[in-house]
Image (cartoon, rainbow, N blue to C red):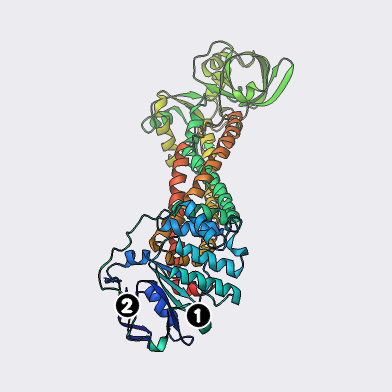
Amino acid sequence: MLKVKNLTKKFQSRVILNDLSFSFPNTGLIAIVGESGCGKSTLLNIIANLDKEYNGDILFNNYNYRDYQKEISKGIGIIYQNYNLLDNYTAFENIKISALINDNFIENDIYTLANEFGIDNKLLKKKCAVLSGGEKQRIAILRVLINKPSIILADEPTGALDSKNSEIVMKILKDISKTSLVIVVTHNLVLANKYCDNVIAFSSLNNIDLSRDKEEKKKLKKITNDKSFFQLIKCHILENKIRHFLAILALVFTFIFTNLCLTFVLESRSIGKTVSSNFYDRSVFAVSKSEKEKIEDSLFSYVQLTRPNTSEMMSLKRILPDFDFYYDLSAFYPNVISITANDKVINNVLFLPCFEDLKNNEIVINSTLEKLIDSNLLTTKLETHFLYQNETFQFRNELSLRVVNIIEEVSVLNNPKIYYNYFLAYNNLNSMYLSDAVPKTYIQIIKEVDNNDLLSNYQMLININDKTKIPDMYKIMNKGITNYEISSNAYSIENTINEIVKAFLLVLAMFEIITLISCFSIILYITLSIIIDYQKEKAILISLGKNKNSFFSIFFTEMILLLTFSTIVSSIVLMVLRHYLKSTITAFSIPLNLNMFIPFCLSTIFYVLIIFMITLIANEKLKKENLINLLRNE
């Protein structure tokens, strides 16, 4: 028995229902008629438990609505004038989802019930959007009946139908009323008088008592598990294939780009240090003394470099890591030479001293030079003209060299190199005399010339004895030493690569920010557009008994599935990219492992958080919509 006591409903200052009381039986077909806007639909919404903002009490079988909202809602079915079917789902899916929400799904029951109402299997497979009005209303009724409700509320069920279909629908409702209470709100007095057990004018509804049952508590329907979760996700994904495809594309592109960015960021921090550590002369540094000289009659000045003397070098020992110092030989052993290998001439080869253990004519070359030669026997002619004591002399020396080792150095920004033993070169120059007229060795000349003479090369060489102290040396060079300039081939390359990496990472960061904003905007737009289209669907599902708080988990799971698929696609693309990038990097001898596992995990966590935020934003927007207004309007 349905009993309404002192029901009052206000909208702002307007009173829609005023202290209304009545009783209806457990079965029967009752029609409520009245003018539009008098409150009939409002009353149905309250009885349907869709509108909970009212004063008074409603009891079903002596259970108060306020105390047993969920249990009573499970026993109520609603039939709408505009059908409120899920148009993009098939007729069968509409009925199935309603059954799943209430844990009543048995597939054969749907077919059996459909056959009873003259609906064949072919029609059940059609999408509701293509059905006629009469077919839609019958599907809407089937959707209600599959759950065997105790109360069926029909709001203008024949309002959008022709006379033939109106008769069919009323006959169906009449049959249903034998086992359930059916309350119909209608303007069609002819049909109401023909089929309904009672026809009541809304204005006369107060204090009506049609109850034929004893006032006793009957068992309410149990709260069952909602099993529509995966069916809704499946239908929703299929319904929005194109938009989901665009979301996947955005996620895949951004995921790949983010992964590559993180990989380069994590591995490039020490790339300069790693590169320089492979240099054979990394312990060799050049030291010059620098003094500012002002240009006469000018505001400008310049830096004059000179070779430090022995006492100055000794004073540096108190500042720098333990080292030995040597005279620079590049006046006669130039830093850039041409070599010949099997009659092939190679120009612009760096010729650098080292203090490693090499014998006689043995040399070490880098991998860049190795690619240019096809023999381990090389020759070079050292030839230069120089001024000494106001006379011009010529130095000539032909060297036969044998490659004994090849060093893997990064080929980017790196020239072909030969490393020779400093002490062997020193002894060679110390055994060669300038001329009969000037019986001095070339080493004696280098030592005797002024510290600002071209033959001094304006610098001394130092070799750090403990190579583990080289990073300390770099720190000192970064800070600088007053009146001294220190340089190193390895240090210069490291700094250059570090600067390139910084610039590259800055550009990468800018693109990553743009990519993330774009991806976030695209996915948010797609998600909001899906959810805006989903508003009516959500309202229908809630009216069928779906918990309104369950939609966040549906949206979130849906987006996680998209992210999972995007992640799988991205991981395949990343594996291919890693293979080709690794090949390219190896060709340039760049020490990057491209280990993408940690970036992959970080990216995944990051995008799960983004998806969570987007879903939360979209779900909050959906919560603000008025449920009853959505059900009333297409």
Q: Position of residue 582 (x, y in %)?
A: 57, 32
> Which quadrant would the N terminus be assigned to in this image?
bottom left
Which residue in the protein does label 2 denote? Answer: 211
Under mark 1, the amino acid is Lys
Instruction: Classify 586 as above or below 497.
Output: above
Q: Residue at x 55, y 56 (%)?
A: 518
**Can I make out residue 144 in this image?**
yes
**Residue 360 lies in what quarter of the image?**
top right
- In the picture, measured across the screen, residue 13 lies left or right of residue 568, that is left
Tag 2's secondary structure?
loop
Mark 1 or mark 2: whose residue is earlier in sequence? 1
How would you rate the neighbour count of disc 1 (Cα within 10 Å): few for under 14, some for 14-19, many for 20 or more?
A: few
Of marks 1 and 2, the one in the foreground: 1
Which residue in the protein does label 1 denote? Answer: 194
Q: Residue at x 40, y 74 (%)?
A: 28
Under mark 2, the amino acid is Ser
Q: Position of residue 184 (x, y in %)?
A: 45, 77
**Residue 519 lies in what quarter of the image?**
bottom right
